């Protein structure tokens, strides 16, 4: 009878402790993340009470049209359109919005626009990145780079 009680308590404890341990292990967004398309790596760091993210790797760092390092040429602001893609900041004002979640703006270098965004840690090796324009929202899951 005592043995059965110990087994039940052990099972219950593992059910309670496992999600807490998972959340604790998966709660840190800091690190380098590979975008869902696999074409860029973004370094996420803690900054100003929130998080920042900058491009640190590109699958195609050299623009095939110019044979020069890729630049932010889709940006409608001529002063910004010449900045290099490497080191380009993607997040702005990304502040805590709940446990393992941040809200702010994300820059989309594919079209040169910034969008309202939510970022959440979806596990120790998964970062959910979502953006919205008007009522339309979309997202992707980035994986922690090794």
Image (spheres, rainbow, N blue to C red):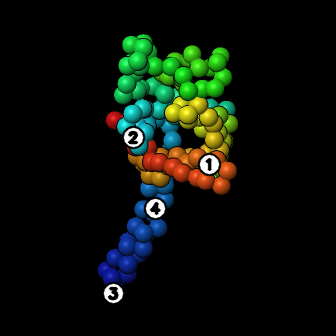
Which part of the image, by quadrant, shows the N terminus? bottom left
Contact? badges 2 and 1 (CB < 8 Å): no
- Residue located at (57% from left, 16% from top): 82
- Residue located at (61% from left, 45% from top): 117
Q: Nearer the viewer, mark 4 or mark 3?
A: 4
The relative height of residue 31 versus residue 122 in the rendered view (above or below) is: above
Q: Please tell me which of labels 1 and 4 falls first in the chain.
A: 4
* Secondary structure at numbered mark 2: loop
CA separation in Å, label 1 and label 4: 30 Å
| Viewer-side residue, 143 vs 60 | 60
The picture places residue 57, in percent across and down from the top left corner, at 41, 26
Residue 37's tag is 2
CA separation in Å, label 2 and label 1: 19 Å
User: Does any portion of residue 121 appear in the rendered image?
Assistant: no
- Residue located at (40% from left, 67% from top): 14
Q: Please tell me which of labels 2 and 1 falls first in the chain.
A: 2
Per the image, the residue denoted by label 3 is 1
CA separation in Å, label 4 and label 3: 28 Å
* Secondary structure at numbered mark 1: strand
CA separation in Å, label 2 and label 3: 55 Å
Q: Please tell me which of labels 4 and 2 falls first in the chain.
A: 4
| Viewer-side residue, 90 vs 114 | 114
Per the image, the residue denoted by label 4 is 19
């Amino acid at each position: 009878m005592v043995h059965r009680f110990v087994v039940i308590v052990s099972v219950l404890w593992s059910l309670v402790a496992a999600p807490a341990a998972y959340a604790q292990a998966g709660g840190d967004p800091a690190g380098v993340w590979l975008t869902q398309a696999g074409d860029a790596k973004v370094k996420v760091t803690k900054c100003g009470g929130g998080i920042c993210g900058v491009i640190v790797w590109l699958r195609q760092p050299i623009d095939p049209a110019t044979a020069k390092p890729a630049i932010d040429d889709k940006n409608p602001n001529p002063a910004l359109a010449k900045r290099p893609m490497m080191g380009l900041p993607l997040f702005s004002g990304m502040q805590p919005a709940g446990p393992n979640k941040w809200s702010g703006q994300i820059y989309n270098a594919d079209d040169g626009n910034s969008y309202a965004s939510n970022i959440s840690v979806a596990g120790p090796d998964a970062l959910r990145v979502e953006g919205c324009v008007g009522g339309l929202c979309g997202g992707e899951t980035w994986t922690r780079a090794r």
